[in-house]
Amino acid sequence: MILDIVQVGEPVLRRRSLPLSRDEIVSPAIVELIENMRETMHAAPGVGLAAPQVGVPLQVAVIEDRAEYMEKLSADQIAERGRRPVPFHALINPVCTIVEPERVECLNEKGDPVTIAADGWYARILQHEIDHLNGIVYIDRMRLRSFCGAANYERLWKNRSVADFLREIPYET
């Protein structure tokens, strides 16, 4: 079932989500939530979705970055972003440790401990979804001067490099 995605302003997006026990993780309700989140992420379309984004204050996120999502990107854009396909998986009760590469310790959908080492685009996806589980939304981390609507992004930035962006919109201190 495709779930409704809540928008910034909803209180659930600004609160730390609740962790799950192993018994809760393997319960029919959480198994169904993970599958519904997967369907919702695909329908969006997106590469990650955290439970608070569908109004559920639990430490659950799903991630999948399919090769087909990269078909319209140039080889340079893929390389610059460090992007590669990532198979579907769930993160439960994740803890992010910043090392080279970034490491996330969490439980999978069976309740088993997992350590994920990531870099590039995958590390960004992980950080973004874990932020949602901790009440942080992307506008809290963005360079405010870079904020623009979809039409301006398409017109001005979509096919430009990060280096171009940084030259034209320097980081404010």
Image (spheres, rainbow, N blue to C red):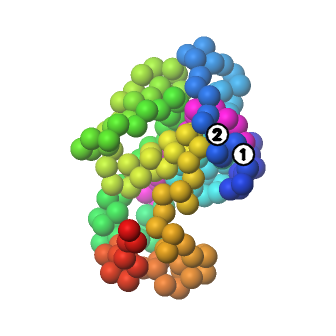
Question: Is 127 or 135 nearer to us in this picture?
Answer: 135
* In this rendering, position of residue 148 left or right of residue 75: right
Question: Is 49 or 100 nearer to us in this picture?
Answer: 100
Secondary structure type for disc 1 = helix
* In this rendering, position of residue 83 left or right of residue 132: left
Residue at (50, 42) in percent of width and height: 130
Residue 5 seen: yes
Tell me if label 2 and label 1 are in contact, CB under 8 Å.
Answer: yes
* Magenta stretch bounds: 55-68
Query: Mark 2, residues whose alpha carbon is within 10 Å: few (<14), some, or many (≥20)?
Result: some
| Residue 120 in the image, given as x and y percentages of width and height | 33, 54
* Residue underneath mark 2: 15
For badge 1, the amino acid type reads Pro
Residue at (44, 47) in percent of width and height: 127
| Residue 111 in the image, given as x and y percentages of width and height | 51, 20
Screen quadrant of the N terminus: top right
Question: Is 84 or 105 nearer to us in this picture?
Answer: 105
Residue 57 sits inside the magenta stretch: yes
Query: Mark 1, residues whose alpha carbon is within 10 Å: few (<14), some, or many (≥20)?
Result: few
* Residue underneath mark 1: 11
Distance Cα–Cα, label 2 vs label 1? 7 Å
Residue at (44, 29) in percent of width and height: 106
* In this rendering, position of residue 151 left or right of residue 157: right
Residue at (31, 49) in percent of width and height: 119
Secondary structure type for disc 2 = loop
